[in-house]
Amino acid sequence: MFFIKKYKTIIFIGAVIVIPLLMISLHIKYGSEKSFLKKIVLEVVSPVQNVLSSSMTSVRDAWLRYILLVGIEDENKKLKKKINEIEAALISYKEGYLEAQRLRKLQSIEADLKHSLVYARVIGREKGALSRTVLINKGSSDGLKSGMPVLAPPGLIGRLVDVSWHSAKVLLFIDENSNVDSIVQRNRTQGIISGAGSRGMMLRYISKTQDVQEGDVIVSSGMGGVFPKGLLIGQVKSVDRQDGGLFLKINVIPYTDLSKLEEVLVLSSGITEK
């Protein structure tokens, strides 16, 4: 009894298959004279064949769908790979275009100055709390020396302080150790641009009697013969006349976004007037 209960499904399926086969064999043996038996055989065999046919059709359709899905998946993988390649190419082309735009700006500076200029790439940044310097990939082997001015569109950004054979350090104007003679372009008031770190720069030693306004352009004065005269440095952000000292407290923001420096020009020859 246990055996019958355990395998009753298999026994039933076997009976469904075997009985029609026996009836078919009887039909073949006794021929068309047993018409009643023939009818019984047909009645029993037809549902079984229908089930088997439906099952085979379902299996065939499922297999075809599987083959189709596999084909679509392979096609999607190929398309995705091609899309990734196109996107990579577009990114590369865009990067080349942006670099060409930056180089064009550098060339415009070079065209305006009667100096020898050395093109260099920024390869590092110092992240100190007070120090604001960048490292470039040119050095003494390229004719660079400490103290040379450094430019990036649209104007001056600093000077060289340490030079090795194939690299050099640029002290940016926002560094607290940086000072450069400058003038207010509008009224030629002279002062000193000093670095103020994250606050940008300060225009110092301007008397409270002087007319300095927000938005005034600050350019290099040319004093001392280190920096060319008249190059952009920054723009006045605010003027505080309420400070208790003798001089105005003037905040200046650099014209160049120093956080995005990628290429610079080093002025490697002496200054000559245009």
Image: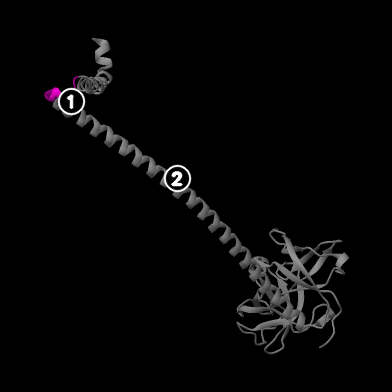
Hey, which quadrant is residue 105 in on the image? bottom right
Q: Residues within 10 Å of mark 1 (few under 14, many from 20)?
A: many
The magenta-colored residue range is: 30-37
Q: Secondary structure at mark 1?
A: helix
Q: Pick the residue in front: 243 or 97.
A: 97
What type is the residue that disc 1 sits on? Val
**Residue drawn at (78%, 82%), measured in percent from left and top?**
113
Q: Does the stretch in magenta take in 2?
A: no
Q: Does the stretch in magenta take in 35?
A: yes
Q: Which mark is residue 70?
A: 2
Q: Pick the residue in front: 25 or 112.
A: 25
**Residue drawn at (16%, 29%), measured in percent from left and top?**
43
* First along the sequence among labels 1 and 2: 1
Which residue lies most toward the bottom here? 187
Q: Which residue is mark 1?
A: 41
Q: Measure the alpha-carbon separation of dots 1 and 2.
A: 43 Å
> Where is residue 79 drawn, in percent x and y?
51, 55
Q: Is residue 166 left or right of residue 205?
A: right
Hey, which quadrant is residue 270 in on the image? bottom right
> Where is residue 250 drawn, in percent x and y?
65, 77
Q: Nearer the viewer, mark 1 or mark 2?
A: 1
Q: Is residue 274 above or below residue 66?
A: below
